[in-house]
Image (cartoon, grey):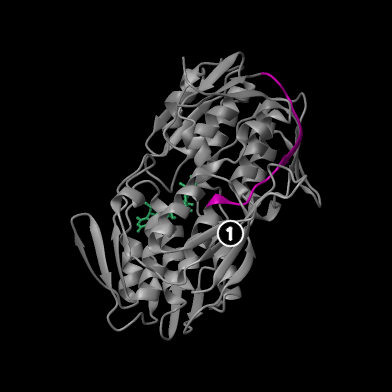
């Protein structure tokens, strides 16, 4: 199993190109099941999760192709992929596939919309929490879906087709909103979703669906209205830039020090995180090219954050911000309000010398002068990358195990950091 070795202490200087967003690419790819025509997506990141979803969609009958690399093109140039679900050949999403990637549960919506039936394995819990799908199922039931849960599978049918309805989410759910939108675009009549997730990835999905002929209004607001249409067409769509990747490298630059340009990063998608980084002591400027993060000399200051749905501080940056706070002056209070178990990085950061106390959903981080490298591992991708950030600033060598978590969500991580002067290498075949 691969590991990543980092020798800390180098300031970061250079440009990091920001990839297309994993969490936008995945629902967009699933949306290809909604049409018989080809959906072409540009700026798709080369990630293990994307490859896994290609396999899952292939199982349902989706044809896949990818643009080749042209002569002279940068090996890290963004990919364009083409997905065509002319005929859906299987409406079952088996446990073996859904258990590998939770987001694949969302195929339930297009399968129902296109085929009137779906048999989809329940995804089960995961490292960051129990993560139920009750709200996704509630939304589908409102749209006229009848379902039974048997032997770990949801058997769903829409004998009269999907019918527009009012869907009021009691909590903001990204997956629930994706599911409700994908089902409602092909439902008969009008759907109103209230307390919808406003995450940029939801907006990207809805924007692409509108290009495909859907009638979605209120995109990016908490009240979304959808007028169902008979069928959708193919479209071209560029996947939005990855705000979590951008925020992660912004925190890396703030922690290690230096001057980094995050090329293609969109400041509007990162408001509260950039504010927190600025308060912590980095200088953040936005230019036509992207976001520039600098920190030279001055120390870091403790800042309190609490995760919240967009536009609040993202849960997917909580672990990285905690890494940053481990070397800030004073005590920082980090509250996780989205997932109940998303503090798995705390014990690993402690291995690097961090002082963190957990009190329920709050982590109290007392900054230390310096972290020391150590072997570490983590159980999800954001936790893993928080260890990478800490390692970049730590004294000495850190080896991050279970690199497959990083490969799920960070494209060319070593290359991107390496070109900014970080000493980071992938070790295959552990000794
Ligand atoms: C998406 O997960 C993201 N995944 C997550 O990113 C992200 O952390 C999360 O949204 C929150 O922003 C993808 O986009 C692939 P939710 P999702 O439904 O949709 C509860 C990463 O690291 N809930 O918004 O699964 C749930 O337990 C990943 O890239 C229910 O109770 O998250 C949680 O507490 C990890 N019942 C809260 O809502 C439901 O039916 C928000 O979850 C659904 C959700």
Give the quarter of the image for residue 411: top right
Number of marks: 1
Is residue 423 found inside the magenta-colored segment of the image?
no
Residue depicted at 47% across the width and 62% down the height: 30
Q: Which residues are magenta?
A: 9-22
| In the image, residue 83 above or below residue 366 | below
| In the image, residue 225 above or below residue 297 | below
Query: What element does badge 1 sit on?
Result: helix
| In the image, residue 59 above or below residue 320 | below
Residue lying farthest to the front in this orientation: 71
Residue depicted at 60% across the width and 48% down the height: 45
Question: Label 1: which residue?
Answer: 200
In this orientation, does residue 53 appear? yes
Disc 1 residue: CB within 8 Å of ligand 1: no
- The percent position of residue 285, horizontal first and vertical second, equals 78, 44
Q: In which quadrant of the rendered image does the N terminus lie?
A: top left
Residue depicted at 67% across the width and 18% down the height: 9
Residue lying farthest to the left in this orientation: 151
For this rendering, which residue is in front, 175 or 84?
84
194 sits to left or right of 75: left
For this rendering, which residue is in front, 54 or 45?
54
Crowd band around label 1 with a 10 angstrom C-alpha radius: few (<14), some (14–19), many (20+): many
- The percent position of residue 289, horizontal first and vertical second, equals 79, 49
| In the image, residue 337 above or below residue 229 | above
- The percent position of residue 326, horizontal first and vertical second, equals 56, 26
């Amino acid at each position: 199993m691969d590991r990543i070795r980092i020798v800390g202490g180098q300031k970061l200087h250079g440009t990091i190109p920001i990839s297309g967003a994993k969490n936008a690419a995945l629902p967009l790819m699933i949306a290809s099941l909604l049409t018989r025509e080809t959906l072409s997506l540009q700026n798709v990141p080369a990630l293990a999760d994307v490859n896994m979803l290609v396999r899952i969609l292939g199982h349902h009958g989706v044809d896949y192709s990818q643009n080749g690399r042209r002569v002279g093109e940068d090996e890290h140039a963004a990919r364009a992929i083409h997905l065509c679900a002319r005929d859906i050949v299987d409406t079952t999403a088996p446990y073996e596939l859904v258990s590998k990637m939770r987001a694949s549960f969302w195929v339930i919506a297009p399968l129902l919309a296109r085929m009137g039936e779906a048999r989809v394995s329940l995804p089960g819990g995961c490292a960051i929490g129990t993560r139920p799908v009750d709200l996704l199922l509630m939304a589908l039931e409102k749209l006229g879906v009848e379902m039974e849960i048997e032997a770990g599978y949801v058997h769903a049918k829409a004998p009269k087709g999907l019918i527009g309805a009012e869907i009021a989410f009691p909590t903001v759910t990204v997956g629930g909103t994706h599911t409700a939108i994908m089902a409602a675009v092909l439902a008969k009549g009008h759907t109103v979703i209230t307390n919808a997730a406003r995450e940029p990835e939801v907006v990207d999905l809805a924007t692409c669906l509108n290009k495909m002929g859907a009638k979605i209004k209120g995109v990016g607001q908490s009240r979304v209205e959808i007028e169902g249409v008979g069928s959708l067409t193919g479209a071209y769509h560029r996947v939005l830039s990855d705000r979590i990747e951008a925020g992660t490298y912004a925190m890396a630059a703030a922690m290690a020090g230096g001057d980094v340009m995050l090329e293609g990063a969109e400041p509007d998608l990162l408001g509260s995180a950039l504010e927190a980084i600025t308060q912590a002591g980095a200088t953040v400027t936005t230019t036509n090219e992207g976001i520039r993060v600098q920190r030279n000399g001055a120390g870091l200051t403790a800042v309190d954050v609490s995760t919240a749905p967009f536009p609040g501080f993202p849960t997917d940056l909580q672990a990285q911000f905690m890494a940053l706070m481990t070397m800030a002056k004073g005590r920082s209070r980090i509250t996780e309000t989205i997932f109940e178990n998303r503090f798995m990085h705390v014990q690993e950061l402690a291995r690097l010398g961090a002082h963190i106390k957990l009190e329920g959903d709050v982590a109290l981080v007392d900054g230390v002068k310096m972290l020391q490298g150590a072997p570490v591992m983590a159980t999800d991708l954001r936790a893993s990358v928080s260890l990478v950030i800490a390692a970049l600033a730590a004294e000495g060598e850190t080896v991050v195990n279970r690199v497959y978590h990083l490969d799920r969500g960070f494209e060319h991580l070593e290359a991107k950091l390496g070109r900014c002067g970080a000493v980071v290498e992938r070790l295959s075949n552990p000794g």
